[in-house]
């Protein structure tokens, strides 16, 4: 029995429960000396899990006799410092996500699984494959080498000089001989490529860039929106600000969209900066990620560049945060811990009292509204830097026109002209696959997903029908399954169909299709981008993937085949997304000397939205949209939270949400409007029926006040056990 005043360890464990768990320290450990942020292996449920210590307290809600001791203390020093723990606690509260799971997201997988932090910047001596086959007898004339090798052989990961010193004999001389025999390999400890000895100077900033650079305060929290058209030199501004940060002996954290982290961008950073650049993205393996993470935490990397989750990288000497393409949806995690890395970056910068720059050619309405309210300082780069002139925009009215696989004669003529001039062209379609609908000409049957309210997409090359919502697939039927007719029509166009058509139409021109299907393999996208740069592809057909940050100097034509879908969507953000997409894709055109042209095919050439985009005045376009949002009381002028529920049982989601609504009302939901339960826009998905409850408030405060106690009660609601439910605070997708 522990006396009631004995210290108790309060631990965040990886479980979907909105609370911490209490444990006793292991026998003989002075718990008051344990720092928050270390990992502990603890008994949980029927097994063991790895949690993170958050507090050492004196009292528990549980009687001490029922508390279990910690199994193992994994770290001597905290993995997550106080600053990051605070950020995670804040995020867990704000997004209403269990703290244990939030912390898991912040840790590289290797650490999550209990891997030790490896000492780095320290060489390691490890046995080679050859040494394992060597008969120790061959070393019997060199007993010290024999002992040393015998000691190293059980350590394939290698030992550090410090560990070898513990052997208590002079190991360096025999080690040299073992290395000379090829039995031991010495590995340098650093895991980051060393910086270039001769960083290239950048261009002299122009007046707008200099004004932007000077406006960002260096030593305090200052949140800025760098609003500049594509090619206006935003990246140059980041680089200058980073140089300034490095000169002050501090680190910069740069967040980029998932697909924006291209080799070219990385190369540009590495070429310019005299510091190791650590990279964190989803394509890394566990040890690469751990290495980059540690280099950031120890201050070895001056710049950390990564996608969404890189926000949670510990920084030894933080000095600046940059969020490039801040409007990009990939900064918001769409499942599990539904945080916005952009929004949390602002919180982190404020906590750290350092400057933060959000950059975009097409800022989110959220950020523009924040500028209007004085929360962000708007820095403006109105013109392209360097030589490039803005591209010319043209709407192609395709009403009544004969289209060939979705392309008008005008568009094909332009394409031909650009190709004849030896330039590259990009054809953009928002849909992958061959055709979005397969229909029987004889009886009207069409291929639908059995598990979703959705059509199956034809993928002709692989002869499959695939559901883009649940991933289920089946072979392409040779005849109509209803009437047996062989006349099956492919309705509509996807990237595959357009690429096939263009390859047939321009047989001498290399066509490259870039979408999720063609880039699934690791490294595939990079290989394609390299091919484009080498001039090995003249026509690019692709989806959003191509809209981001790429720089193709020879690309002079951008054609958008179906901008109309953005005009009539039920999603209130559709117009914002359309504008961002059109201007971002257009930003790929004419980035170097050759002038660029942007063609937009439409059946609605008089649409005010498209007309407005034609002026290439995003600021005006956005302020019109913002006025509409204000009128309609939609974000960013109001704040939303979405409670989603899904189940195989069609009644269960609504029953749960109805009860959830009652609980909210019982808690007193003043200042919060509740809508629903209502079916989700796609009601059936992956065999489950889905419904949602929408909470809306003019101010965040009453919404936040309601959410915490409400979710606590939802966790224990019996109706909640019959559904899968989740809360999304500041949702970006409404389905
Ligand atoms: P953004 O990030 O806004 O798209 P970049 O920083 O990539 O713009 O700049 C676009 C191009 O213009 C790049 O090739 C860059 O080297 C060049 N550039 C940027 N600033 C200048 C400048 N001040 N003088 C000359 N060229 C510049
Ligand atoms: Zn049929
Ligand atoms: Zn499906």
Image: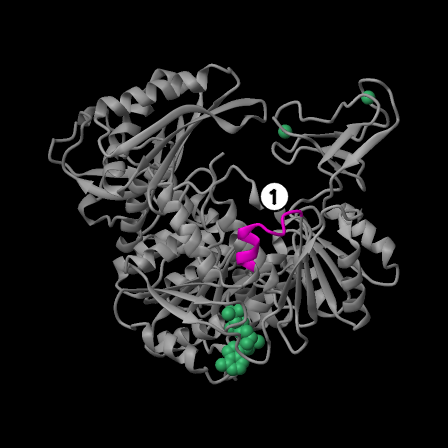
Q: Is residue 601 left or right of 606 when viewed as pictured? A: right
- The residue tagged 1 is 565
State the residue at coordinates (61%, 62%): 586
Q: Quadrant of residue 699?
A: top left
Where is residue 202 drawn, in percent x and y? Answer: 50, 82
Q: Quadrant of residue 212?
A: bottom left
Q: Is residue 128 above or below residue 420?
A: above
Where is residue 674 drawn, in percent x and y? Answer: 33, 28
The answer to which of 693 and 242 lies nearer the viewer is 693
Q: Is residue 321 left or right of 184 when viewed as pictured? A: left
Q: Is residue 60 above or below residue 216?
A: above
Residue range of the region highlighted in magenta in the rendering: 603-613
The answer to which of 419 and 268 lies nearer the viewer is 419
> Considering the image in quadrants, where does the N terminus appear?
top left
Note whether residue 464 is visible.
yes
The answer to which of 89 and 361 lies nearer the viewer is 361
Q: Is residue 6 left or right of 292 when viewed as pictured? A: left
Is the residue indicated by label 1 positioned so its CB lies within 8 Å of ligand 3? no
């Amino acid at each position: 029995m522990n006396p009631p005043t004995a210290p108790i360890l309060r631990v965040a464990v990886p479980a979907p429960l909105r609370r911490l768990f209490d444990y006793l320290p292991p026998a003989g450990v002075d718990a008051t000396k344990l720092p928050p942020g270390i990992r502990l292996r603890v008994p949980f449920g029927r097994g063991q899990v790895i949690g993170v210590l958050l507090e050492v307290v004196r009292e528990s809600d549980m009687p001490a006799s029922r508390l279990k001791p910690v199994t193992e203390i994994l770290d001597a020093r905290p993995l997550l410092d106080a600053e990051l723990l605070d950020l995670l606690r804040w995020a867990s509260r704000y997004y209403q996500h269990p703290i244990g799971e939030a912390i898991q997201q912040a840790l590289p997988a290797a650490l999550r699984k209990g891997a030790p932090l490896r000492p780095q910047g320290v060489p390691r001596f490890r046995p080679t494959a050859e040494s394992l086959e060597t008969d120790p007898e061959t070393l019997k004339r060199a007993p010290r080498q024999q002992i040393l090798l015998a000691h190293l052989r059980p350590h394939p990961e290698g030992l550090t000089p410090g560990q070898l010193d513990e052997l208590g004999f002079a190991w360096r001389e025999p080690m040299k001989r073992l290395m000379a025999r090829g039995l031991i390999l010495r590995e340098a400890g650093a895991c980051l490529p060393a910086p270039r000895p001769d960083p290239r100077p950048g261009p002299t900033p122009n007046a707008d860039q200099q004004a932007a650079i000077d406006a960002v305060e260096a030593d305090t929290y200052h949140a800025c929106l760098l609003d500049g058209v594509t090619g206006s030199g935003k990246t140059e501004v980041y680089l200058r600000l980073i140089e300034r940060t490095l000169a002050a002996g501090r680190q910069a954290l740069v967040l980029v969209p998932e697909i924006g982290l291209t080799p070219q961008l990385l190369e540009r950073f590495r070429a310019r900066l005299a510091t190791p650049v650590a990279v964190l993205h989803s394509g890394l393996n566990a040890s690469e990620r751990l290495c980059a993470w540690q280099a950031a935490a120890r201050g070895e990397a001056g710049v950390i560049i990564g996608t969404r989750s890189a926000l949670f990288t510990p920084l030894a000497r933080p000095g600046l945060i940059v969020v490039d393409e801040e409007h990009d949806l990939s900064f918001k995690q769409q499942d599990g811990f539904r945080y916005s890395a952009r929004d949390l970056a602002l919180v982190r910068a404020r906590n750290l009292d350092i400057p933060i720059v959000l950059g975009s050619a097409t800022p989110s309405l959220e950020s523009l509204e924040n500028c209007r309210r004085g929360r962000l300082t708007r820095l403006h780069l109105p013109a392209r830097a360097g030589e490039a002139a803005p591209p010319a925009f043209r709407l192609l009215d395709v009403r009544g026109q004969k289209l060939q696989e979705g392309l008008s004669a005008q568009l094909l003529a332009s394409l031909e002209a650009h190709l004849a001039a030896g330039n590259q062209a990009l054809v953009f379609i928002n849909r992958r696959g061959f055709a979005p609908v397969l229909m029987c000409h004889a009886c009207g049957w069409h291929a639908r997903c059995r598990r979703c309210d959705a059509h199956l997409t034809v993928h002709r090359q692989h002869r499959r029908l695939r559901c883009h919502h649940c991933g289920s697939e089946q072979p392409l039927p040779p005849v109509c399954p209803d009437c047996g007719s062989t006349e099956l029509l492919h309705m509509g166009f996807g990237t595959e169909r357009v690429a096939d058509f263009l390859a047939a139409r321009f047989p001498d021109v290399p066509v490259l299709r870039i979408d999720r299907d063609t880039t699934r393999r690791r490294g595939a996208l990079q290989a394609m981008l390299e091919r484009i740069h080498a001039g090995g592809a003249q026509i690019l057909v692709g989806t959003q993937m191509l809209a981001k940050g790429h720089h193709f100097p020879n690309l002079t034509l951008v054609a958008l085949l179906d901008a109309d879908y953005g005009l009539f969507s039920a999603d209130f953000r559709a117009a914002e997304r359309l504008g961002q997409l059109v201007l971002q894709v257009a930003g790929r055109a004419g980035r170097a000397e050759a002038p660029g042209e942007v063609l937009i095919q439409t059946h609605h050439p008089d649409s005010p939205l498209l007309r407005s985009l034609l002026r290439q005045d995003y600021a005006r376009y956005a302020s019109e949209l913002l006025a509409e949002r204000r009128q309609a009381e939609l974000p960013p002028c109001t704040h939303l939270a979405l409670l989603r529920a899904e189940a195989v049982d069609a009644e269960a989601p609504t029953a749960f949400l109805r009860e959830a609504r009652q609980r909210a009302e019982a808690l007193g939901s003043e200042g919060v409007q509740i809508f629903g339960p209502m079916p989700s826009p796609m009601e059936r998905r992956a065999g489950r029926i889905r419904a949602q409850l929408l909470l809306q408030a003019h101010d965040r405060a009453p919404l936040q006040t309601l959410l915490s106690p409400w979710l606590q009660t939802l966790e224990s609601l019996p109706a909640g056990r019959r559904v899968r439910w989740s809360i999304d605070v500041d949702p970006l997708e409404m389905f």
